[in-house]
Image (cartoon, helix red, strand yellow):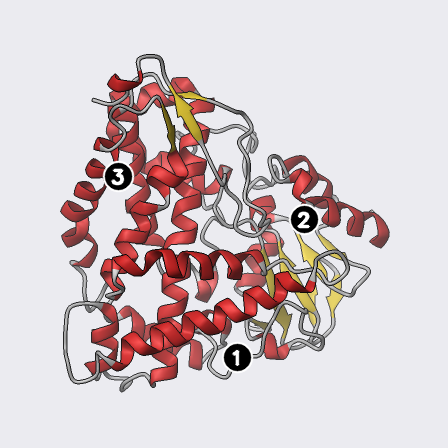
Amino acid sequence: MTTTETSGTLRRILDYSSRADPYPLYAELRETPVARQEDGTYVISTYREIADVLHNPHLSSDTRSLCRPPAGIEAQATPAFINLDPPEHDRLRRMAMRHFGPPHTPGLLAGMEPALAAIVSGLIDDFAGKERIDIVDDFAYPFPVAVICHLLGVPREDEPKFHVWVDDLINSIDYDPRTDPKEKLDKGQQARRDLREYLGGLLERRHGRPGDDLLSRLANDDGPDGRMTDDEIVATANLLLIAGHETTVNLIANGMLTLLRHPQVLQRLRDDPDLVVPLVEELLRYEPPVHIIPWRAAYNDMTVAGTVIPQGSQIMLMLASGSRDPDRFPDPDRFDPDRRDNQHLGFGSGIHLCFGGPLARRETQIALTELVRRLDRPALVADPPPYRRSPVLRGPIHLHIERSGGQHACR
């Protein structure tokens, strides 16, 4: 396809009218694996090329490497490590991982399982007597939020406050000055400042007071790499608070929607709960929570699939398109939990592979297993459901289900 044609396809993907089913448009994009857009951005849409670029040392995650940073990016004195390159990325990620998982805290996830199960059970108990349930508002949102608040040491009663900030921040990710009101960008930037100020206040009260939550550990523990600065801790906590629940909300909601569209698979999971492990991997390929990495930069000139991407150019990686690439996955548009060799791009790849992926997987496994076990004859109220605005973090904003005899809706 020509530059004009691929630019048109990308605009249709980003347009909200395509949110319910962008996959046919991804197929159009894959006809040109590396496509230069009219604004100079390079869009990469095929599996092999995305995977190669994510492992390419010439790819920069630091938006300061861009010749022309997008309008939605606000300069930050201390970016989160996801927006940094080695060696700073590696140092900060190691320091955070000391308190989040193996090898330094190998039992963290296993030790959380009773609490995860209790939260899930309590939320499903609250469905009793309801004829209609919103899987997003009643379950998929409060579950991971409760988990990440507990991990970080954020007071659960402050959730309504940061819920608004996170929504405004996420809504501003895909800001387009050509079509969006400036208020959208301003609200996102103010939300980012408000959230950092809030987390900074929590951090101040942790110094000299060791505790089990992640903020306390980061504020008081010296490891081999030393201790993070306060700005680095706030940037890390900001990343974990947002990424720690936004992706999981989408994964659970997309998962339940997919199961309701595939009743035979739903029944298989009910009969065989062990199916949930490969099933969630297939969900990460088939209906991933993150569709697009919108901002990467060419640190030097790069050649990808015969196309030279000049230094400083913006690169957009279409992860969800790559995971539906027929050159990598046979029959890619079929949901198949028995799929083998399922090295999807649902959590990215390379040095920026999703930091919280193991937790999101386990949360989703527990959530879907219990929903399927306890919900009796659930049915979608609307298909497709209404979707969130963001094309980057894609998932239903509501997912209403119902069954006859609502007071017996769960076991």
Residue 58, how many percent across, how many down? 60, 73
Residue 171 at x, y percent in the picture: 56, 56
Nearer the N terminus, badge 2 or badge 3? 2
Left/right placement of residue 364 relative to residue 221 reads right
Q: Which residue is rendered at x = 23% and y = 79% of the image?
A: 205
Determine whether the residue tagged by mark 2 lies in a helix, strand or loop. helix
User: Is 333 above or below relative to 34?
Assistant: above
Q: Residues within 10 Å of mark 1 (few under 14, many from 20)?
A: few
Residue at mark 1: 76
Q: In the image, 292: left or right of 357?
A: right
Residue annotated with mark 3: 366
Rendered position, 248 above or below 70: above
Which one is in front, 369 or 157?
157
Q: Amino acid at mark 3?
A: Ile
- Going by the numbered disc 1, the residue's amino acid type is Gln
Give the secondary structure at mark 3.
helix
Q: Amino acid at mark 2?
A: Leu
Task: Examine the rendered structure and indicate whether residue 281 appears above or below residue 350.
Answer: above
Indicate which disc residue 14 carries: 2
Q: Which mark is residue 203?
A: none
Residue 245 is situated, as x and y percent measured from the top left of the image, at 37, 53
Q: Quadrant of the C terminus?
A: top left
